[in-house]
């Protein structure tokens, strides 16, 4: 089955700096790669996703890149703000009921 | 606003008790999932259901069972709770043809 690895487990940046979180996956059949943000006391919320026919997707300050050959994808957050502080999860799926998640990255943005 | 609602935010149960965690979604989604979340391990799939009365084992089904009698409701059952089942439990759902999940807020279960 699919195995998703996520790095780093913790990340601390100064407000205004960029943050990058990286994930690798093992199943070449995976074609959907979402990112979830989990704030304290809440469930994960989908913030951006990318499908395998696209190499990059951007939504305001967040972007995701995908390298299918290397089986890795990354989340980029620019101009970080304190409200970006949360736990971020990457995931991979082949479109069925097989979504597998990374272990999570705790991002802290220092004011 | 679409919702996945988990009935309890915090739950404390004794070892050996039978525990029911309830999840309801109002989006008419076919698929529903139960995950447990532990530090450093991320989200691990316990069970999922793709239709009423249908269920499939996930990666860690041991010690758990599920019930889906109605489309909107998916229950996770701990037949005899043990301390190693202390965790955050997350319910999620999605519709056919849509890959993204909507999660509930989670139930933090402590077994003492």
Image (spheres, rainbow, N blue to C red):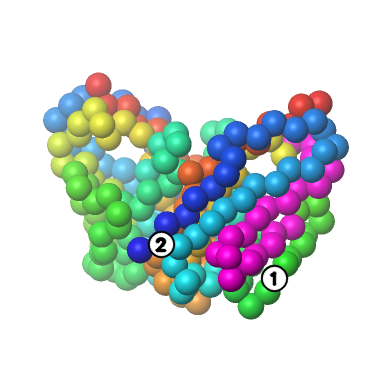
In the foreground, A111 or B14:
A111
In the foreground, B71 or B99:
B99
Marks 1 and 2, the one that precedes in the sequence: 2
In this figure, which residue is indicated by the disc labeled 2?
A2
Q: Is residue A108 left or right of residue B38?
A: right
Queried whether the magenta region covers residue A78, the answer comes back as: yes
10 Å crowding of disc 2: few (<14), some (14-19), many (20+)? some
Residue A82 lies in quadrant = top right
* Image quarter hosting the C terminus of chain A: top right
Q: Could you tell me residue A48's position as x and y percent?
A: 66, 59
Please give the name of the residue rendered at 60% of the width and 34% of the height, measured from the top-left corner: A10
Queried whether the magenta region covers residue B44, the answer comes back as: no
In magenta, the rendered stretch is A63-83
Q: Could you tell me residue A102's position as x and y percent?
A: 49, 49
Instruction: Give me the chain letter of mark 1.
Output: A
Q: Which mark is residue A83?
A: none
Please give the name of the residue rendered at 64% of the width and 78% of the height, measured from the top-left corner: A53
In this figure, which residue is indicated by the disc labeled 1?
A55
């Amino acid at each position: 089955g699919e195995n998703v690895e996520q790095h780093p487990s913790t990340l601390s940046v100064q407000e205004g700096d960029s943050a990058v979180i990286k994930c690798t996956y093992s199943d070449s059949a995976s074609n959907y790669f979402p990112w979830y943000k989990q704030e304290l006391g809440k469930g994960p919320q989908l913030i951006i996703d990318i499908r395998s026919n696209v190499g990059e997707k951007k939504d305001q300050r967040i972007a995701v890149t995908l390298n299918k050959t290397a089986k890795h994808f990354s989340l980029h957050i620019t101009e970080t703000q304190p409200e970006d502080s949360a736990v971020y999860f990457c995931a991979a799926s082949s479109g069925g009921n097989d979504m597998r998640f990374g272990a999570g990255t705790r991002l802290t943005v220092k004011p | 606003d679409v919702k996945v609602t988990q009935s309890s935010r915090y739950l404390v149960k004794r070892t050996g008790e039978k525990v029911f965690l309830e999840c309801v979604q109002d989006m008419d989604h076919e698929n529903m999932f139960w995950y447990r979340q532990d530090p450093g391990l991320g989200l691990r799939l316990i069970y999922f259901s793709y239709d009423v009365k249908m269920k499939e084992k996930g990666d860690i089904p041991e010690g758990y069972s599920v019930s889906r009698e109605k489309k909107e409701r998916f229950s996770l059952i701990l037949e005899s709770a043990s301390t190693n089942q202390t965790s955050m439990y997350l319910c999620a759902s999605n519709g056919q043809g849509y890959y993204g999940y909507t999660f509930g807020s989670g139930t933090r279960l402590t077994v003492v």
